[in-house]
Image (cartoon, grey):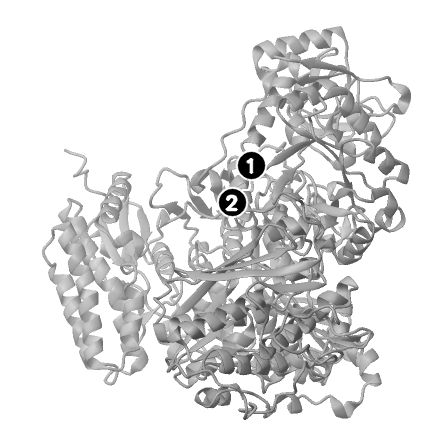
């Protein structure tokens, strides 16, 4: 027996329903693909029911035909539609199957007749149903011909539309519903007819025998109905993407594939923005507990998303974040309105009368705020004005728009609130108009101003991962990122950390044996990072922001790489001057610097940056005849923590844009030429688009100032520390910068990265002093803490921690890694999985080349932490 | 020349030459003995010029040379102006003196300069009447309504130009209203613009009209002068574009140039030491009349230059624009120069500048609120930080901003209309208007309706006059 003719299936073999959309059925190669997939399911020992959409474009063509008043044009349209099917048949080298011929004849007849005889809606439904009737007939012929005997099933004989109250003729015929429950008789009847079947999506039949349509998302819904009727082993939706993601990949390229969801979570995600599945296609499967699998037709090897009954063996996690735009809020305020029977009923009656449907609701004793989704009625009629006029008679009303609803979805949301503090802090910076949390505990929704969403969403996604609220470390739930599956120009995977190489590890252990704590800097890593940045062709001058690490060996190495240097104090200027050659350009960018600091800065070769009105207003003569750079505040900040954000009114940096004219008048009066504009919005930013925006905004400002020659877009290039965080894509960054540069070629582009150059190069070595158990917690003590490295305490920064002595041993214990400083905040890392330690083991804290030693303090008088440099 | 010119210390601004060949006009200027500053204007797919139009073309090109010089002259504002091919006739000298004086009035105000008595183009015969134009934002003549033209005016020959119209597109609402008005009467028109703004290109594309995109390359030397401390500021760019289009009309064959400058463009922004300062002087009626008469007299009797929107207030125009939803997602009147377009409202509207404030306010009475907010991507009237900007529009506590925006009374009428609407009245700045500003105003002068009535004052030629009906 060959693989093409497996053993006959028993009558009670399980069913698999497979649904293919319009693009999947439009070409011969796609049909060959379908054949392979169906055959593989049959080979699993299952009966297969294939549900198909119309060939891509055919449903639209049929709709167009329906709207055509002229008989000749309808006839021509039907002819063109038939031709699409003839063409595909020709590719398949198939003769016209009789079943398809009959459908084409009937379509021609319907086009000829027009709507008069049947009534407009019933005729239109029947005409549109032909898309699926024809594609399924064609598919039956192709599959049977290619050795997979396939029976054609008329979906209308299986799916009976339910009669619902409040249904008008239009909804009855064009967006029907089916109550699908397991029907063993139907399953048995089909099982007697064969093993592989094909039927139509989108269509059903009502009690009076007329053909009806299932409306939007109809083919997926048909597949679910069949899954429920047959109580299938699973329903597979084959589409052009591998499943549902933790966010819309167009907004968040780092969104992760969701490998497992329960029905309710999936429905919530589908309802709040994901377009992969129509939300209504899940409810038919819930009661019969039939799982649904979303798969990518082009990449069948990818896991896809399985949606099934609730599973309890996973830690609670946020599953997805979504945004819906174009939302209008209506806020109603009245002191006397409560306790009044029927007040809300009256209020909502106004919404109904003006045809506006309410989505979210938030209420207080004296205020009710509701959200309205964007509809044509809302945007293009006076419905909102009329509603407001009616409501104004009984309460104060305010219409707030345009808003966006940002929704976090995950089962057990309320139990995760404590993990969301960094996310909630982000919302603290914004105008939040409404917060809604439903009693099903699946979601948490914030309504904010729409214009913040595009930048906010990727940022929140990062924060959710960093906060451990979106548990991307759970590989059973979360698959690869969209970028790694579908992205182009994917950044190469990060090079393995230098200290993991056996030879380097040995050297580090030897250095630790001499003394700890010690910082060790690996210059080849500094050089590698420097060379990476030099690949940014759009950037004309790179400065090393020396505040990250002022070790002379690092300064010299970067000078050799051709870097310029950015200093923020006279002390840094002196340190740099002592280490680098005269030829290296300097930039002096102090903040709230004293007059004397400027005097000292001006005495060097550095280009001086001003970032306030005060110095030019009060010490203007100091700068007479000078060329300066001006740091402006573009009015918003970004970054991984509030304390590393350096833009926006809440930050002390930069001249507010509205004071620019005043600054220029003072500058002019003192013969000072503003040669450069500078902005720097924050640190740890991983989204390339951000620098493009800063660059574009600076360029637009520069156009108002004749004298500007360069634009300095700062640094803040993110260094991923957390597992699952994508690296900054330098090629993408360069592309963004080049695009802006093409528009403003007359300005030189400067940058001033710091941490990006040196973070990975440095490690902090410490030794285990002891362990302690306390309740369920285990503490691992090392011989230095926040006195050497304050970033975890100051910024909640995450640093990888490894037991260098036992690098290859399994990580079995969960530890709080702490130092000896008398502060409860002296924690270098929480909840770290590490091998069982012994006193004297060497612990390595990674990515400490930046803001480590330079931010260390004598606190507790534990002495200086030494620095050691490795040059190879 | 290798000496470095210090622009603010120069003594003479010199018009060197204007040449045209193969679709490229070359305009040359210099300060003192400095390197020539050469500007190039590229006319795409330029047809060969018919001999019959040569004289008209030469006259238009000479005007362009003189008008475009304003971009360079302002870098140094030297005391003397020299024209290499000899002094100008009185008409031309009057036009240029007025343009440089009034068109640079804001520039002068901002830089603390006084240009009166400093601008004198060389002219044949007697010196100009001593006080001509000074202290009067309206310029030298007060033009008559309608076809107004002095009966004794000199006439250039008629060239039998094709009956079609160049409509300059700016990316904002006004020119789109003008385009649709001309389309409504089946008029043949071309969407024309100067420069490479992607915003304008997107709007021009959306009009569905044939397009004419002329490129203007400023002399690179100007950038260097700026670096050396040149004076900087607003120039009457509409005058430069008008002169470019006059050349284009003769070159390609158009009988009319229909701008979209509205009534309030003629109103001065402020008065400063006895001189009226109007940010949009070259969009005003006085300049329109002077240039139109000059073109009839020196270029072609059948080349009409007008503004189709002259009879209308900003509010009448925003009302007309509110009926053109096909442009809502492409247009922008924001004065920030968006060289890179994006899909979001914030990629077209900065939300901070007077233009954003005014267009938002003026459209609000005529559009459903959610639709308006979708255009801008935010609600500028519910943002307290924008109070000063709107105050300036209302001429409350401040003068009108230096922008192409409507009159203060017009803004007050629009704000008052919103104050009467429940869906607007709780918004921060509308509520503030009702509580703080409205009680100080004369309620009788806040009606919207009078602003919607057209005025009879315009120079729209007979052929295009039916288009005015479409505007309202």
Mark 2 falls within which chain? Answer: A
Q: Residues within 10 Å of mark 1 (few under 14, many from 20)?
A: many
The correct choice, above or below, for A467 with respect to B397 in the image is above
List x then y, in percent, for residue A796. 74, 36
3D distance between C-alphas at marks 1 and 2: 9 Å
Q: Which label sits on residue A726?
A: 1
In depth, the one of A787 and A311 nearer the eye is: A787
Residue ID at (39%, 74%)? B53
The correct choice, above or below, for A734 with respect to A136 in the image is above
Q: Is residue A153 visible?
A: no
Q: Which label sits on residue A446?
A: none
**Which of marks 2 and 1 precedes in the sequence?**
2
The correct choice, above or below, for A390 with respect to A511 in the image is below
Query: How many tags in the picture?
Result: 2
In this image, B305 relative to A44: left or right? right
In this image, A400 relative to B40: left or right? right
Image quarter of residue A58: bottom left
In this image, B363 relative to A519: left or right? left
Image quarter of residue B280: bottom right
Residue ID at (48%, 88%)? B461
List x then y, in percent, for residue A617. 86, 51
Confirm or deny contact between disc 1 and disc 2 (CB under 8 A).
yes
Mark 1 falls within which chain? Answer: A
Residue bearing the label numbered 2? A253
Q: Is residue A864 visible?
A: yes
Instruction: Identify the secondary structure beneath mark 2.
Output: loop
In depth, the one of B26 and A50 nearer the eye is: B26
Residue ID at (18%, 46%)? A148
List x then y, in percent, for residue B155. 48, 85
State which quarter of the image contains the N terminus of chain A.
top left
Same-subunit check for callouts 1 and 2: yes
Instruction: Identify the secondary structure beneath mark 1.
Output: loop
């Amino acid at each position: 027996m060959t693989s093409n003719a497996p053993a006959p299936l028993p009558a009670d073999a399980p069913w698999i329903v497979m649904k293919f959309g319009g693009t999947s059925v439009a070409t011969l190669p796609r049909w060959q693909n379908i054949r392979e997939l169906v055959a593989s399911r049959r080979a699993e020992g299952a009966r297969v029911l294939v549900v198909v959409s119309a060939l891509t474009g055919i449903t639209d063509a049929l709709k167009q035909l329906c709207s055509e008043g002229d008989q000749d044009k309808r006839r021509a349209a039907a002819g063109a539609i038939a031709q699409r099917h003839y063409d595909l048949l020709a590719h398949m080298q198939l003769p016209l199957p009789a079943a398809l011929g009959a459908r084409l004849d009937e379509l021609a007849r319907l086009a000829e007749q027009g709507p008069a005889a049947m009534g407009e809606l019933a005729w239109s439904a029947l005409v549109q149903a032909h898309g699926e009737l024809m594609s399924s007939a064609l598919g039956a012929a192709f599959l049977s011909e290619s050795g997979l005997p396939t029976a054609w099933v008329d979906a209308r004989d299986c799916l009976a539309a339910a009669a619902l109250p409040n249904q008008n003729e239009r909804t009855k015929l064009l967006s029907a519903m089916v109550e699908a429950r397991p029907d063993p008789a139907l399953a048995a009847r089909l099982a007697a007819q064969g093993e592989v079947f094909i039927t139509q999506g989108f269509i059903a039949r009502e009690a009076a025998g007329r053909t009806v349509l299932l409306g939007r998302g109809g083919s997926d819904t048909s597949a679910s109905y069949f899954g429920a009727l047959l109580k299938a082993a699973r329903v597979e939706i084959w589409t052009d993407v591998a499943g549902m993601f933790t966010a819309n990949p167009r907004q968040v390229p780092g969104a992760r594939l969701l490998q497992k969801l329960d029905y309710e979570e999936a429905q919530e995600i589908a309802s709040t923005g994901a377009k992969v599945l129509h939300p209504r296609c899940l409810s038919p499967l819930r009661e019969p507990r039939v799982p649904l699998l979303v798969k990518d037709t082009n990449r069948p090897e990818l896991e896809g998303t399985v949606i099934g009954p609730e599973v309890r063996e996973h830690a609670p996690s946020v599953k997805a974040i979504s945004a819906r735009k174009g939302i209008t809020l209506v806020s109603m305020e009245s002191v006397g309105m409560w306790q009044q029977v029927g007040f809300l009923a009256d209020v909502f009656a106004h919404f109904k009368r003006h045809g506006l449907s309410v989505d979210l609701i938030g209420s207080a004793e004296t205020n009710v705020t509701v959200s309205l989704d964007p509809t044509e009625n809302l945007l293009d009629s006076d419905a909102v004005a009329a509603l407001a006029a009616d409501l104004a008679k009984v309460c104060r009303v305010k219409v707030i728009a345009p808003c966006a609803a940002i929704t976090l979805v995950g089962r057990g949301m309320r139990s995760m609130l404590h993990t969301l503090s960094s996310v909630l802090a982000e919302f603290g910076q914004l105008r939040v108009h409404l917060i809604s949390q439903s009693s099903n505990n699946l979601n948490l929704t914030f309504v904010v101003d729409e214009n913040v969403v595009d930048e906010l969403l990727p940022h929140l996604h990062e924060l959710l991962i960093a906060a451990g609220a979106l548990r991307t470390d759970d590989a059973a739930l979360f698959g690869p990122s969209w970028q790694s599956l579908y992205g182009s120009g994917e950044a190469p995977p990060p090079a393995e950390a230098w200290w993991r190489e056996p030879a380097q590890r040995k050297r580090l252990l030897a250095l630790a044996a001499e003394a700890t704590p010690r910082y060790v800097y690996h210059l080849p890593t500094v050089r590698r990072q420097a060379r990476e940045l030099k690949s940014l062709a759009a950037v004309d001058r790179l400065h090393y922001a020396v505040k990250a690490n002022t070790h002379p060996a690092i300064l010299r190495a970067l000078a050799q790489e051709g870097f310029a240097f950015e200093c923020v104090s006279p002390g840094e200027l002196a340190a740099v001057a002592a280490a680098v050659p005269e030829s290296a350009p300097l930039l002096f960018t102090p903040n709230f610097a004293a007059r004397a600091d400027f005097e000292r800065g001006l005495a060097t070769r550095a280009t001086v940056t001003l970032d306030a009105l005060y110095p030019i207003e009060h010490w203007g003569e100091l700068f007479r005849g000078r060329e300066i750079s001006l740091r402006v505040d573009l009015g918003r900040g970004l970054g991984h923590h509030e304390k590393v954000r350096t833009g926006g009114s809440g930050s002390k940096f930069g001249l507010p844009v509205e004071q620019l004219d005043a600054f220029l008048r003072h500058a002019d009066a003192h013969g000072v030429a503003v040669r450069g504009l500078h902005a720097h919005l924050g640190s740890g930013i991983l989204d390339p688009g951000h620098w493009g925006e800063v660059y574009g905004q600076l360029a637009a400002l520069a156009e108002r100032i004749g004298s500007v020659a360069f634009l300095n877009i700062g640094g803040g290039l993110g260094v991923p520390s957390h597992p699952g965080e994508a690296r900054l894509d330098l090629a993408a960054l360069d592309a963004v910068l080049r695009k802006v540069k093409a528009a403003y070629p007359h300005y030189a582009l400067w940058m001033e990265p710091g941490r990006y150059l040196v973070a990975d190069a440095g490690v902090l070595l410490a030794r285990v002093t002891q362990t302690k158990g306390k309740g369920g917690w285990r503490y691992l003590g090392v011989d230095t803490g926040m006195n050497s490295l304050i970033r975890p305490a100051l910024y909640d920064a995450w640093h990888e921690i490894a037991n260098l002595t036992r690098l290859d041993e399994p990580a079995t214990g969960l530890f709080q890694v702490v130092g000896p400083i008398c502060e409860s905040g002296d924690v270098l890392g929480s909840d770290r999985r590490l091998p069982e330690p012994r006193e004297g083991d060497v612990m390595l804290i990674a990515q400490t080349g930046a803001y480590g030693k330079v931010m260390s303090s004598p606190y507790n008088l534990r002495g200086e932490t030494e620095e050691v440099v490795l040059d190879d | 020349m290798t000496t470095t010119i210090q622009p603010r210390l120069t003594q003479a601004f010199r018009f060197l030459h204007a040449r045209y060949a193969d679709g490229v006009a070359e305009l040359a200027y210099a300060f003192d003995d400095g390197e020539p500053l050469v500007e190039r204007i590229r006319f795409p797919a330029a047809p060969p010029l018919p001999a019959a139009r040569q004289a008209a073309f030469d006259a238009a090109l000479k005007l362009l040379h003189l008008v475009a010089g304003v971009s360079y002259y302002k870098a140094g504002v030297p005391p003397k102006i020299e024209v290499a091919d000899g002094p100008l006739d009185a008409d031309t000298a009057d036009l240029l003196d007025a343009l440089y004086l009034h068109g640079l009035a804001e520039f002068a105000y901002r830089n603390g300069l006084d240009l009166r008595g400093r601008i004198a183009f060389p002219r044949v015969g007697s010196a100009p009447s001593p006080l001509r134009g000074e202290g009067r934002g309206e310029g030298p003549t007060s033009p008559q309504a309608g076809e107004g033209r002095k009966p004794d005016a000199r006439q250039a020959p008629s060239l039998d130009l094709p009956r079609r119209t160049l409509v300059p597109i700016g990316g904002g609402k006004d020119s789109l209203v003008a385009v649709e008005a001309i389309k409504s009467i089946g008029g043949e028109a071309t969407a024309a613009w100067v420069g490479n703004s992607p915003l304008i290109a997107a709007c021009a594309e959306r009009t569905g009209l044939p397009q004419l995109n002329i490129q203007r390359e400023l002399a690179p030397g100007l950038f260097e002068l700026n670096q050396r401390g040149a004076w900087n500021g607003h120039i009457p760019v509409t005058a430069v574009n008008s002169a470019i289009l006059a050349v284009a009309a003769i070159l390609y064959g158009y009988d009319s140039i229909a701008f979209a400058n509205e009534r309030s463009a003629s109103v001065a922004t402020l008065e400063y030491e006895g001189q009226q300062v109007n940010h949009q002087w070259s969009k005003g009626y006085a300049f329109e009349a002077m240039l139109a008469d000059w073109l009839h007299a020196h270029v072609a009797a059948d080349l009409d230059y007008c503004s189709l929107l002259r009879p209308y207030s900003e509010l009448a125009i925003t009302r007309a624009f509110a009926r053109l939803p096909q442009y809502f997602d492409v247009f922008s009147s924001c004065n920030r120069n968006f060289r890179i377009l994006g899909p979001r409202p914030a990629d077209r509207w900065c939300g901070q500048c007077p233009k954003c404030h005014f267009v938002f306010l003026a459209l609000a009475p005529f559009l459903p609120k959610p639709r308006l907010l979708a255009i801008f991507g935010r609600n500028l009237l519910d943002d307290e930080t924008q109070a000063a900007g709107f105050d300036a529009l209302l001429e409350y506590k401040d003068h009108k901003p230096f922008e192409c925006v409507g009159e203060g009374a017009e803004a007050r009428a629009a704000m008052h209309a919103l104050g009467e609407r429940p869906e607007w009245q709780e918004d921060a700045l509308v509520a503030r208007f009702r509580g703080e500003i409205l009680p100080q105003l004369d309620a009788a002068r806040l009606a919207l309706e009078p602003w919607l009535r057209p005025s009879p004052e315009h120079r729209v030629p007979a052929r295009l006059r039916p288009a005015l009906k479409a505007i309202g």
